[in-house]
Image (cartoon, grey):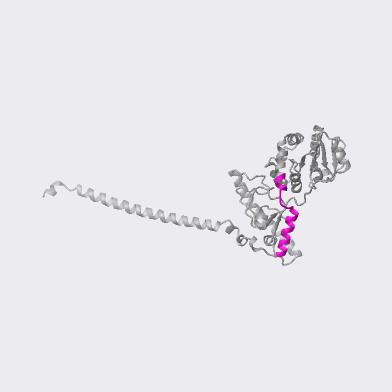
Amino acid sequence: MTSLRTESAWANQSPSPPSYLPVAGTGLTDELTFAQRVYNVAAYLRELYVHQHVVQPRIDAVFQKYYPGVESAFEIERNASINLVNTPPIFDFSRPYMPRVNFVGAIHCRKAQELSQELSSRIATSTDGFVVLSTGFTVQWNRAPSHIRRAYLDTFKSLPNLLFIWQYDADQLADLPSNVIVKPWLPLQDLLGHPQCRCHVSHGGLNSVIESVYHGVPVVGVPLTSRGYDNLLRITARDSGVLIEKDEFGADTLTAAIKEVVGNEKYKNEMLIFQDMVIDVPYTELYHAAFWVEFIERHQEVPHARSGADRLNFLQYFLVDVIAFFLFVIYCASAVIYYSVRIVFRAVRSLIGLVLGGGKGQKSVPKSKKNN
């Protein structure tokens, strides 16, 4: 299972034109200005360089320690017969990919099951439904800054008609509002699939974001990492949620974002459209993944699913050698034309000078000499 980040796409030779495909961590979408394209190309080259010359050698050192003589990690990834990608096919921005790439994102998603009696009874008493707040295992709340926790608590207090179900694994809070339930672990899919779920406040983890799409719940994004930020951009680009920038986070912005998503039906409607496209498939992702794994087991190697790009280096793949050749040919042709025109021009100018010079000589002969 892999992603289609820059380095993974390079390994399986799926084209990733930086003219419109944003590099992970740049915070860009697929609509780029000139300056953003320049930045994206620089990020693309940096990503490939760091992965090939910094990350891969360290991985290879570990491989050689425990499996002496094994191929490099890059060759193993490049020679893979199949690549299972951990996102749905339309979750990411539209892009080309090789035949051996198969999207099986949402493979972990399922229909919601019945909630516990405790959660069900509390949800039933909520006037305007409930909001889920999850951070996966990224956040250790006992180590979170106090002003961050205070921002959440102030938000809860300012929205008393909403029930907040918060994944919180630290010590019990003394001033916890009555409209808040805290749990160290949440049955997230069961909550997201509940008809009273109005919004999901997410840190941007890929699985939780995909689960929000699968269950049709709009998102308020509070990204904690660059990868989470990228995942949430896929939501906001489809008007299925809003995103709070790191330097803008606070009780006021969080409250305003939740009010916007809960109160504006646009986000719910757009998320339902997004959901419909993700789940409208002829077979489940599990079946799809199982089929291709068994297909490879039956046929072993599938050369028709590979391309000649596997045997090209960086300069050959991007036609740098061909472009350099054409530039050289154009330069040579331009030089030949330039010097040819220059020689012809000088010859014509000399000829004109001779003709004009000869005519002037005849006119200067005295009339007396002609009479004699």
Q: Position of residue 35 (x, y in %)?
A: 59, 44
In the image, farthest residue toward the left: 372
Question: Residue 43 vs residue 188: left or right?
Answer: left
Q: Classify the position of the N terminus by image quarter.
A: bottom right
Of residues 191 and 340, which is closer to you in this image?
Answer: 191
Tell me, yes or no, if residue 166 can be seen here.
Answer: yes
Of residues 193 and 208, which is closer to you in this image?
Answer: 193
Q: Quadrant of residue 252?
A: top right
Q: Which residue is painted at 61% across and 62% down in the image?
A: 311
Q: Position of residue 186 (x, y in %)?
A: 83, 45
Tell me, yes or no, if residue 244 can be seen here.
Answer: no
Of residues 10 and 241, which is closer to you in this image?
Answer: 241
Q: Position of residue 91 (x, y in %)?
A: 69, 47
Picture mark count: 0
Q: Vertically, is 324 above or below 200?
A: below
Question: Residue 29 vs residue 157: left or right?
Answer: left
Magenta-colored stretch includes residue 362: no
Q: Position of residue 8 (x, y in %)?
A: 68, 55
Stretch of the chain drawn in magenta: 275-298
Question: Residue 81 vs residue 112: left or right?
Answer: left
Question: Residue 177 vs residue 9: left or right?
Answer: right
Q: Quadrant of residue 143?
A: top right
Of residues 363 and 298, which is closer to you in this image?
Answer: 298
Q: Quadrant of residue 36?
A: top right
In the image, farthest residue toward the front: 282
Q: Which secondary structure type mostly characterizes the magenta part of the structure? A: helix
Magenta-colored stretch includes residue 295: yes
